[in-house]
DNA sequence: AATACAATTTAGATTAGACTAAATTTATCG
DNA sequence: CGATAAATTTAGTCTAATCTAAATTGTATT
């Protein structure tokens, strides 16, 4: 039962998982961009993953891929490692939320299951990583997320920030400056239908955020 | 100044360092055994390391290799990572001294310099790993070791265990059972010139140890 | 329906690191 | 000293993962 999937394959599966979360297939080009690998190479690898025994992806020429059950388990394994590591690095080595991603990106492939268990236990089995993203359970199930993109809110509505997805380090630092961290209570002050800008208040701070940002912030909105 | 040496190369350099500590050259066969790689492959890699710009090893056909200055720095970098990681895993995740080696073996190649600095600072810049082995300094100098192999001691002599080198997990657990951990005060009770067995007392425990073991334990003996 | 552009796939080459089998060099020992 | 054995190197193969260039397929637009 030793996984022995290469680091490269683990990365493909993780990115396929993320690209297919909404139910769509992961296209060759999208994977190429995420993985920084040329499309021709992606096609090649994807065919290998589909031909593997057991198959890790479902692949139809020109239609992109989805994960099989085995592929999904392998992806969640990597994602669990990644998110536990992020939480662990923040908690024990004082990393900030904009620094952890890169480090976890490399460590996620080499820690043992024992390491994973020890981290989880030492932190009391946390549910979310420093960005507020859900951590798959030890038996590799992704908990249900019940959150709304901030971009869907309108003036007067109140909500709590739950997570920030796919943000680069610079944006994370910016959000921290604006008091927009997971857990923060916010109120929508204004909305512009022209550019979809939202004016958001968090504590004493008021910010005007474009769709680029509001689409990456997810909130707990009781509606 | 990004190192970018492959994991494989890092492992070669680390093992060459260990095999040449006594001043000898590291032979193809010795490296083959340590690395679990066939001798032909070792020759191949060693020639590549010698041809690298800058050269990482000095190589003469049929004579084995030694490290160049650059090779030694790279080796010490890996060894510093390894030993800091071992100390860190023991301290923060409750690993025991017989469990840490394997984990550190994989992590040593992927942590950042930032991770290294944070670990060192968090532990107050420790001098030794859980096996008592010296940790190279941040500027990659190996501190001088002033220790004697336990095998050199004779009855009535007293000493303090400083480190245990190259022991497998099973032996480490055995030594722990016998109270023979780094820091332990010991007295030599008996010596057999036939088999070189030493009878050693640590606290209330008395053990008879063969050369296989006494050659791997190093002590602080004021003589 | 025809065409043009974008996305994808095929084909062939490259790199790193390993392996086996065979050749060669060095060491040992009667 | 010369014959063996051991250690090492050479030569040729293999696998994983990538790349470039060229061919193909799908789609959007007129
Ligand atoms: Mn993350
Ligand atoms: Mn795991
Ligand atoms: Mn060690
Ligand atoms: Mn380092």
Image: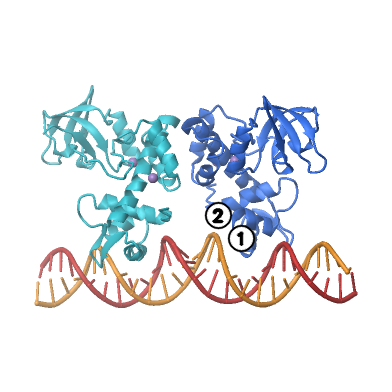
Chain colours: A blue, B cyan, C red, D orange
Seen from the viewer's position, the closer of residues A200 and A151 is A200
Q: Chain of mark 2?
A: A
Seen from the viewer's position, the closer of residues B166 and B56 is B56
**Residue A100, horizontal then vertical, whole percent:** 53, 39
Rendered-image quadrant of the C terminus of chain B = top left
Q: Quadrant of ligand 3?
A: top left
Q: Please identify the quarter of the rendering in which residue A32 is found.
A: bottom right
Q: Are marks 1 and 2 in contact (CB under 8 Å)?
A: yes
Q: Is residue A221 visible?
A: yes
Sequence-wise, the earlier of marks 1 and 2 is: 2
**Residue A90, horizontal then vertical, whole percent:** 52, 33
Q: Please identify the quarter of the rendering in which residue B26 is found.
A: bottom left
**Residue B45, horizontal then vertical, whole percent:** 36, 63
Identity of the residue drawn at 71% across and 45% down: A21
Q: Chain of mark 1?
A: A
State left or right for residue A152 relative to residue B8.
right
Q: CA distance from mark 1 to mark 2?
A: 9 Å
Mark 1 surroundings within 10 Å by alpha-carbon count, few (fewer than 14), some (14 through 19), many (20 or more): some
Instruction: Name the secondary structure under disc 2.
Output: helix
Q: Which residue is mark 1?
A: A45
> Which of the labelled discs sits on residue A8, or is there none?
2
Q: Please identify the quarter of the rendering in which residue B196 is found.
A: top left
């Amino acid at each position: 039962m030793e996984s022995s999937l290469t680091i490269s394959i683990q990365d493909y599966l993780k990115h396929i998982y993320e690209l297919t979360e909404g139910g769509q297939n992961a296209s060759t080009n999208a994977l190429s961009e995420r993985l920084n690998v040329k499309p021709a190479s992606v096609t090649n690898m994807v065919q290998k993953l589909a031909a593997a025994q057991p198959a890790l992806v479902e692949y139809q020429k020109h239609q992109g891929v989805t994960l099989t059950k085995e592929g999904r388990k392998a992806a969640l394994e990597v994602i669990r490692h990644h998110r536990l590591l992020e939480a662990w690095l923040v908690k024990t080595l004082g990393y900030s939320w904009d620094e952890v991603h890169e480090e976890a990106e490399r460590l996620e492939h080499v820690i043992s299951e024992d390491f994973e268990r020890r981290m989880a236990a030492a932190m009391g089995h946390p549910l979310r990583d420093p960005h507020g993203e859900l951590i798959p359970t030890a038996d590799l199930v992704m908990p249900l997320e019940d959150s709304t993109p901030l971009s869907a809110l309108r003036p007067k509505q109140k909500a709590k920030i739950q997570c920030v997805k796919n943000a680069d380090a610079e944006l994370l630092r910016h959000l921290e400056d604006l008091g927009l961290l997971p857990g923060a209570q916010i109120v929508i002050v204004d909305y512009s239908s022209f550019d979809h800008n939202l004016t958001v208040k968090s504590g004493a701070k008021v910010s005007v955020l474009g769709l680029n940002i509001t689409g990456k912030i997810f909130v707990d909105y009781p509606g």
